Amino acid sequence: MTTAQSPVLQHRASTQHCAGAGPEPRRSPMPETTQQTAAAPQGVSSALQAITQMAVFAALVAVLGQLIVPIGPVPITLGTLGVVLSGAILGPWRGAGAMVLLNLMAVAGMPVLAQGSGGLGAYAGPTGGFVIAYILVAFFTGLIVQYSWPLRWWRTGLGVVVGSFPAMYSLGLPVMAWNLGITLQEAAMTALVFIPGDIAKGVFAVLVTHTLAKGYPRPFTYARRRGRLRAPQS
């Protein structure tokens, strides 16, 4: 004859049964290979974006470089405006990369420099140092402007002036002096004619940078990566 279990015994039996079932199995984390596979398209997309941006600004400098005022052995060109913009908008590394690309195209013989020049012969002339200096100008301009976010007019202007003028003339003037057979002081006096135009191009570069940052901030990838992409301030 069976006897009914008391409620206490039934509770104990139920507790033991639940305890014997063990804890709920933990979910296994996503395999590392799956995470890497998911991150791969993002890396490819970022690389393609960087290459595209550098190619666009290299082409911009090449086009602007054809707009010149033929004064003396070194013409005044709007190409330097594109150089400054490449650093201010793309940042130091991508901006400098765009100018490296421009120089590589010039070395390959493509007519991407002022007056449609290209090839190694262009670097043997008085403008050769200035073309190489494009890389430094874009890098230092981008480096200073990068740490000026949120942008202010005076800080952007300071970045353009400090980042472009010393780098451009410290490399361009010695090459010009050597090529023309004149002293460095004479080369500096010759370059005084460029100063007003460089200042005007610098002011325009600041205006373009601020206008673009307000209306279309997408190219400023370096500011987004640092979480600094906010509207420019006065």
Image (tube, rainbow, N blue to C red):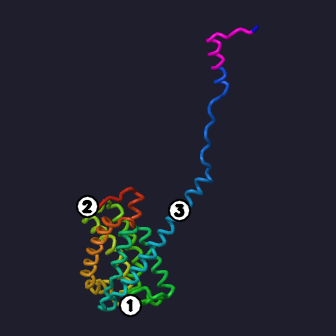
Which span of residues is magenta-colored? 2-14
Q: How many marks?
A: 3
Instruction: Say what amino acid the circle numbered 3 marks.
Output: Gly
Is disc 3 placed on a helix, strand or loop? helix
Looking at marks 2 and 1 on the same chain, the residue that comes earlier in the sequence is marked by: 1
Residue closer to the observer: 70 or 3: 3
Instruction: Say what amino acid the circle numbered 2 marks.
Output: Gln
In terms of image quadrants, where is residue 180?
Answer: bottom left
Q: CA distance from mark 3 to mark 1?
A: 38 Å
Q: CA distance from mark 3 to mark 2?
A: 32 Å
Residue matched to label 1? 115
Q: Is residue 9 above or below residue 119?
A: above
In the rendered image, the quadrant that contains the C terminus is bottom left
- Say whether residue 169 is left or right of residue 117: left
Instruction: Say what amino acid the circle numbered 1 marks.
Output: Gln
Residue matched to label 2? 233
Q: Which residue is rendered at x = 47% and y = 73% of the image? A: 52
Which circle marks residue 43 in the picture? Answer: 3
